[in-house]
Image: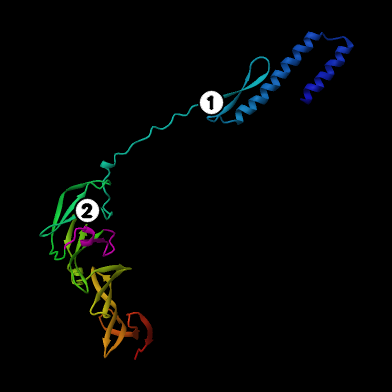
Amino acid sequence: MKKILLMLSSIILLVGCGNIDGSEITSEIQERTTEESTEEIGDIEQETNVPAEAEIYEDLGGGWVVERQVFTVPATEAVTENLAERPMPVWSPEYFQYETTDTGLNVYKTLNVLGERGELHQQLEVDIETPSDNIKDIVIILDYDGDSYHDIAVRTKTDDKNTYYRYFHYNPDTDYFEEWQELDKLNYFASPYGNGLSVFRKTGEFDGETDTYVWKNDSLVLVRKEKQYLDDGLTFREYLEYDENGNETLAKRENLVYDDDGSLISVTDVTP
């Protein structure tokens, strides 16, 4: 712009002296202005990335104007998934479905994530003495040995104190359940607890035992026992610990006092 003003001042001086024709002056001004404007717009075009919507500079003969142009980006076509073709993942607790029979339990493979039942996959022989219309009362699906696959505990019977179970271990290599004698010997319900299992059973109105096991080489090893019992009209609770050889150590003994409603009102440490 300074160059143009300087040039105009020079031209005015020349015109005043009467040495240059006016049409030649106009022509030179227009050519130089056009060249410099083209250089500036050229810089803009080099630095501007054209987005989906951009301003385009164009010389229409009467000077530079701005037009707005919109560029349409093709949309990606949506893909509709057929859930009936997506299989139920093997680590899902709904990978199998169950149905009680007169001889035990029928196992069905779940076809897809919609929960559609497939054909009969396996029959398990187990004596279910206390049936139920709700299959969730009979079959408890949990990972009992920490291998990331779901096993099942099948309720066989109940009485006024306890509930009894049989266990079946899922083998991912065969895709079938197998009898599980290691857990069947527990006889009662086993709750996964860290690296092991916790088993509770009642032996009387206020009496009971909770055994804690850990897994070692596919075998269960007893490590702790919490035992509550009556002795000469008094209620005691003992905490017992077991070493790797099965030797028992009394860690703590407490005297428990209950009111007439059976609510615990005091605990006294009586460890010998």
Of all residues, the one furthest to the left in this rendering is 103
Q: Is residue 137 magenta?
A: yes
Quadrant where the image shows the C terminus:
bottom left
Q: Is residue 17 magenta?
A: no
Q: Which kind of residue does numbered mark 1 sit on?
A: Val
Question: Would you name the residue on which mark 1 appears?
Answer: 70
What is the x, y in percent for residue 122?
A: 14, 54
Q: Which kind of residue does numbered mark 2 sit on?
A: Phe
Residue drawn at 29 percent across, 82 percent down: 228
| Residue 147 is at least partly visible in this image | yes
Residue drawn at 86 percent across, 12 percent down: 15
Question: Would you name the residue on which mark 2 appears?
Answer: 96
Rendering quarter of residue 81: top left
Cβ–Cβ under 8 Å for marks 1 and 2: no
| Residue 253 is at least partly visible in this image | no
Of all residues, the one furthest to the right in this rendering is 17
Rendering quarter of residue 22: top right
Sequence-wise first label, 1 or 2: 1
Quadrant where the image shows the N terminus:
top right
Tell me the SS state at disc 2: strand
Count the numbered circles shown: 2
User: Magenta segment, which residues?
Assistant: 131-149
What is the x, y in percent for residue 50?
A: 55, 29
The front one of 180 and 58 is: 180
The front one of 173 and 214 is: 214
Q: Please rate how many residues cluster around mark 2, counting C-alpha atoms within 10 Å: few if below 14, some from 14 to 19, many from 20.
A: some
Q: In this view, does 215 lie to the left or right of 8?
A: left
What is the x, y in percent for residue 128?
A: 14, 64
CA distance for labels 1 and 2: 55 Å
